[in-house]
Image (spheres, rainbow, N blue to C red):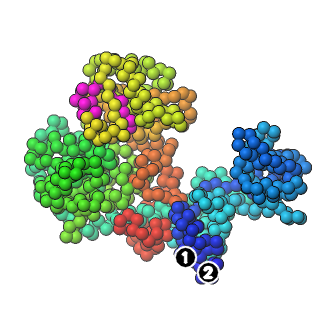
Amino acid sequence: MQSSDSNLASPLTVLNGVGPALAKKLERLNLYRVEDLLFLLPLRYEDRTQLVKIGALQPGSRCLITGEVLLAETVYRGRRNLLVRIGDGTGQVTLRFFHFSRQQVAQFQAGVRLTCFGEARKGPSGLEMIHPEYRILRENQDAAISDSLTAIYPSTEGVQQGRLRNLTDQALRIMQAHTPEELLPADVRGQLGLPELAHAVEYLHRPPADADVESMVAGKHPCQQRLAFEELLAHYISLRRLRALARVESAPSLTGGADEVCKFVEALPYSLTRAQQRVVDEIIADLAEPHPMMRLIQGDVGSGKTVVAAIACLKAISCGVQAAIMAPTELLAEQHWRSFSDWFRPLGIEPAWLSGSQRTAARREALESIEGGSASLVVGTHALFQEGVRFHDLALVVIDEQHRFGVHQRVALREKGVAEGRYPHQLVMTATPIPRTLAMAAYADLDTSVIDELPPGRRPVSTVAVPETRRDEVIARVRDACSSGQQAYWVCPLIEESEVLDFEAAEASYAMLTEALPELRVGLVHGRMRPAEKERGMQAFKDGLIQLLVATTVIEVGVDVPNASLMIIENAERMGLSQLHQLRGRVGRGAIQSHCVLLYKPPLGQLARSRLAVLRDTNDGFVVAQRDLELRGPGELLGTRQTGLPDYRIADIGRDADLMPGVQVAAESIMRGSPDRGDAIVRRWLGDANRYGKV
């Protein structure tokens, strides 16, 4: 039974019908407290506010109808079907069930009246509804018509829509008795035209029949924007707190090493660009502070972020402390280990290597050198922040391709360096240019530096989109490029043939190209290979032993082969703009003009056509990223189907990007004048858990 003193912070078990088993299932929807139900917003709405005559049904429409059973029969057409024919005097429709019980069959006696809701479709003998929701009516009982639109919620196995609607009804009644505190200041709501929280929640769960469904489906209704604003605000405040915390924490002040850095820069075979020098100056200034640096470096592919990170590491090492570099994949981590080894060995610095796939003896040796301090620079994958890794004196953490990691992983590695109350400095890098509003939401805990200039001599990569019907021409182009001494990539999305997805598979393409180009040395690299095997393939390509490398998107980041001047990408229409831009960035690293061919399967849809046009028209990663955000959303842009961005319950940073400037202003005002209000906002949306390590 529902307790009389139930409130919004109560566990879900206070609601009627919620026992331990159902509570466990609801946890899969991140529902723990009554208040959580209020923020489980409907995915869509159905109109059950009026009955539709069966004679007026149109194919494709979802409607509420009522009628009398005329005939019910079980038929066998490949599988068992229950067909129930109903009519209302204006027409007839068949209800088709594939899954049914004897009890259901017994319900559908001729003359029984019922209401049902479903989608009308064309069937073998007129219109039909497949597995509609239905209710048998008692004698003289009228069909129940809703006075509001019917919410359809995100669901999980074992929890039906009717149950979720019943639970949200109970939660809404509790909300009316215990109105949630209005945490958004009135002046903020006034400026943005946002309603009060309780009104917004009530409206979104049970919208009136005349509600603007179009704006709600688009996520732009003022009531949705009200909730999205407060959720974005909660995440922003929690990240800004991490930033504020860093400002009062201690870190080693790294003021030495100026001579070593100067000698290193002078010995480089090229000069730093103005943008690189500006970012180096910002980093060196941060490292000299007695508080932890928390800086993000954004730079397009080929802009020279890695050498900037090397300068930061050398600065730390020259001050007698350790630096660590973490990359998301073994391939990229290995590339960094090789690059840093080439740079630092002449200086007497031997970088240590640490990964999950290391042999036991090599791992033990690496762990001993890290803990003992003889390894002043450590390069590796996420294995760096696993249990058992102890640093001697970690003062600088560099994280590459940050969007592949979550904030909590960033914090976990940072915690590895805590010693005597001091925290390490942190430098985060990404080759995915991030639109300002998205960076504001994802990286509010970091200061940002942008390397917005490519090294001199770099030519933009020429990009064309070609239908796969012209594959022979593309193969001939590969032959010409490789015959003239250049190298080429041929990238495919899948490793093996798939009956579900008709992508070209890397293995099939490798076999086809080996046969079509017998005079070329063709190699294959994909993610399922053993690291050593993959490494041999990549190294052979880098050394020029392989002329054409067939690969999956495993080569998206980090591989630097200046002699490669041609990139072919299969099924380009199926990939995101930022990923295509990353792949394109693997060529154009030498002096010769480079080209990228986007092979697509016609006919192209409008979205795919728009995407490929962006790549043809620009080489600017920030323009590409902005268009990707508009076309696909932030999850795909940052790879956050993994862990890079917070999981928003209601907000969509792509759709709601225009709210971020207001969120930023409101957050600064609340943190300055009403910190308790800020606490409550974070608690409401992120719970009591330390979501980001220290919230």
Residue plotted at (82% across, 55% down): 108
Estimate how packed mark 1 is, as few (under 14), some (14 to 19) or many (20 or more) residues with alpha carbons within 10 Å. some
Asked if residue 371 lies left or right of residue 184, the reply is: left
Residue 540 among those drawn in magenta:
yes
Residue 595 among those drawn in magenta:
no
Pointer 1 residue: 10
Residue 206, percent from left and from top: 67, 63
In the image, residue 108 above or below residue 528: below
Q: Which residues are magenta?
A: 537-554
How many numbered dots are placed on residues in this image? 2
Residue 239, percent from left and from top: 38, 62
Q: Where's the N terminus, which quadrant?
A: bottom right
- The amino acid type found where label 2 is placed reads Ser
Q: Quadrant of residue 59?
A: top right
Residue plotted at (63% across, 64% down): 164
* Mark closest to the chain's N terminus, 1 or 2: 2
Estimate how packed mark 2 is, as few (under 14), some (14 to 19) or many (20 or more) residues with alpha carbons within 10 Å. few
CB within 8 Å, label 1 to label 2: yes
For the question of whether residue 505 can be seen, the reply is yes
Residue plotted at (16% across, 57% down): 368
Pointer 2 residue: 3
Q: Secondary structure at mark 1?
A: loop
Q: Where's the C terminus, which quadrant?
A: bottom left
